[in-house]
Image (tube, coloured by chain):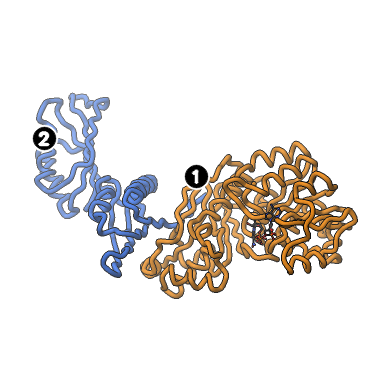
Chain colours: A blue, B orange
Amino acid sequence: MAIVSIVVELKDQPGQLLRVLEPISRLGGNILSIVHQRDKKTPLGRIPVEISLQIDEKKVEDLIKIIKSETIVRSYNEVRLIATTSIMLVGHIIHTDLGDTINSIDRTGFAEVVDMHISMPKLNEPSTAMVTISATGKEKLKEAIELLRDVCRRKGILMIEPLNEEPV
Amino acid sequence: MIRIAIFGFGAVGQGVAEILMQRERIERWIGRYEVVAVADSRGSLCSEDGISLKEAIEVKKRGSLPEGKSVMEIIESMDFDVAIEATPTNIETGEPGLSHIRACLNKGSHVITSNKGPLVVAYKELAELAKKKNVKLAFEATVGGAMPLIKLAKRDLAGNEIISIKGILNGTCNYILSRMEQERLSYQQILAEAKELKIVEANASYDVEGIDSAAKLVILANAVMEMDATFNDVEIVGITSITPEAFEIAMEKGYTIRLIAEASRDGLRVSPRLLPLHHPLAVRGTLNAVLIQTDLAREVFVIGRGAGKIETASAIISDLVDIYGNDRTN
Ligand SMILES: NC(=O)c1ccc[n+]([C@@H]2O[C@H](COP(=O)([O-])OP(=O)(O)OC[C@H]3O[C@@H](n4cnc5c(N)ncnc54)[C@H](OP(=O)(O)O)[C@@H]3O)[C@@H](O)[C@H]2O)c1
C-alpha cells in the first residue's frame, strides 16, 4: 500500500469533489483526509483540494490518469514511509483481536504495520510478536507508537519498545 | 576529629564498618575519625570516645547489638558530625530513615545515606533542610550502588544540561533477563535459579515489578535533573510477563531485552525495552549500567556493580571523603 497526496483544482460547484472521489473508491483506495484550501482560490475561482489516500501502489498511475481526465491535477506525490521501528508485543495477542490491534495503526493513514513475526508456543498461553511499523515521519511514528501503547494497555498486552537514542 | 554515627547495622552498615576499620586507608583521605555510635533495630553501642568496630561486628554476628539507646535517642543525646543512615528502605513512608535524617539535619549533622525511602518520599524537603542548616545530604549509594552517578552527574558534568538518563538500575532484573537471553528458559525457571543463588530476595516483587528501579529513577530525576518528581509520576512495567520467545524473536532482529529506567522531559518510565545486542547498556549478570545524555558532553556511559555490601559501602565512603577529604590528586 502506498500513501498518496494529490492536490486537484475544483470548480466551486456542487458535485465536483465526487468526480475525484468516485475513481478512488472504484480502484479500492481509502481516503485519509480531504482539505479544501479555500484561502488559496485560483484567479479563475477554482479551489485547490488536497486529498490524501491509501491505495495499492500498482494502481497509483491509473488513478492519476483517471483524475487528470476529470479535472486539473496540480501536483501529486507518493508519501514515503521514512521512519521505521520494531516493537514487541507479548500477551494474548490473538485472543484480543490481533486484526484490530494492527488496524489501529493502519487506520491512521500516516503509519502502517509493514512486517510481523508471531510465535505462539501453546494454545491459551501468551504469544509473542514483533511488529515493524513504518510512518511518514519521526513525529508520526511517535504518534503511532502512542496509539499502539493505548491499545495494548487496554488489552493487557505487554509492549516492549526499542530504546531509541534521539540525536542530541 | 570526625565523629561518625552508623544507623542500621546490616549488610551495608557492617560493610562501612569494615572499611572504616582500615584506619590507614581512610585517614589518608579524611584525617582522624571515630565511630561514636552504631545502632540496629534492637539496640546500640555508643561511646563519646569511639567504639571498637571490631567488637561491634563480632557482637552483631551473634545476633543483635546490646540493648541501649535507640537511633532517635542517640541523635538527641550525643554529639556527632556525620550520620550514616543504612536502615531498610520503605518507599511509602520513608521510615524509619526519614525521621532519622530529618533529626540529624536539624541538629546540624551531615547525613550520608544508602536508604532510598526518605529521598523518594521527601527529597525536596530534605535537600532544602540540609541547605538551610548548612550541612550535606549525600546519597551516592542510593542509586547504582558502587557506580559513580550522583556526584558524576552533579559535579563532573557540571555546566551541562542533562537531557536524559536511561539505564539499568536493578541488578536482579538484569540477572534474570540476561539469563533468559542466554538460556531461553522461562521467567519462572530463572527466577527460581536466582532465588537459589540468593540474588533475589524471597519477596522478589519489589525488584521484578520495577518498583526498586522506579524509586532510584525518582531520586535521579530530582537530584540531578532538577525535576520535582514523585514515585507516582513513574510509569512502571515489570519483567514478569516476558516470554522466552520474546528473546528468540528479538535476537533474530539483533535485539535483546532489558528493564530500562528512563528520565527525560517526556517523563519517567520503567519498562522492558528492546536494545541492540551490541548496545553498551545491554550488560549481563547483576551489573548496572547508565547512559547520561547531556547537551555538551553528549553521551556518558557508566557500568558497574549496583549492589553488594562492600560495593555499596564504597559509595558511602566516597561521600564521606567528599565531605571531609583533601583531594590527594591536587
Ligand atoms: N545491600 C545492598 O547491596 C544495598 C545497596 C544499595 C542500597 N541499599 C540500601 O541500604 C539500606 C541498608 O541495606 P542493607 O542491605 O544493609 O539492609 P539490612 O541488611 O536489612 O540492614 C538493615 C539494618 O537496619 C536496621 N534497622 C531496621 N530498623 C531500624 C531502626 N528503626 N533503627 C535502627 N536500625 C534499624 C536493621 O536492624 P536489625 O539488624 O536489628 O534487623 C539492620 O541492621 C537499605 O535501605 C537498602 O535499600 C542496600
B328, A70: nearer the viewer? B328
Query: Quarter of the image containing the C terminus of chain B?
Result: bottom right
Q: What element carries label 1?
A: strand
Q: Which amino acid does label 1 sit on?
A: Gly
Name the side, left or right, on which A167 lies relative to B103: left
Residue extending furthest toward the bottom: B183
Q: What residue type is labelled 2?
A: Leu
Measure the C-alpha gap from mark 1 to mark 2: 46 Å
Name the side, left or right, on which B33 lies relative to B130: right
Quarter holding residue B62 = bottom right
Query: Between tags 1 and 2, which lies in front?
Result: 1
B106, A23: nearer the viewer? B106
Residue at 77%, 53% in the rendered image:
B322
Determine if residue B325 is in view.
Answer: no
Residue at 73%, 51% in the rendered image:
B112
Quarter holding residue B306 = bottom right
Q: Mark 2 points at which residue?
A: A18
Residue at 35%, 47% in the rendered image:
A150
Q: Whole-percent x and y of residue A20? A: 13, 38
Dots 1 and 2: beta carbons under 8 Å?
A: no
In the rendered structure, the residue with mark 1 lies on which chain?
B
Q: Whole-percent x and y of residue B81? A: 83, 49
Q: What element carries label 2?
A: helix
In the rendered structure, the residue with mark 2 lies on which chain?
A
Q: Mark 1 points at which residue?
A: B267
Q: Whole-percent x and y of residue B248? A: 38, 70
Q: Are marks 1 and 2 on the same chain?
A: no
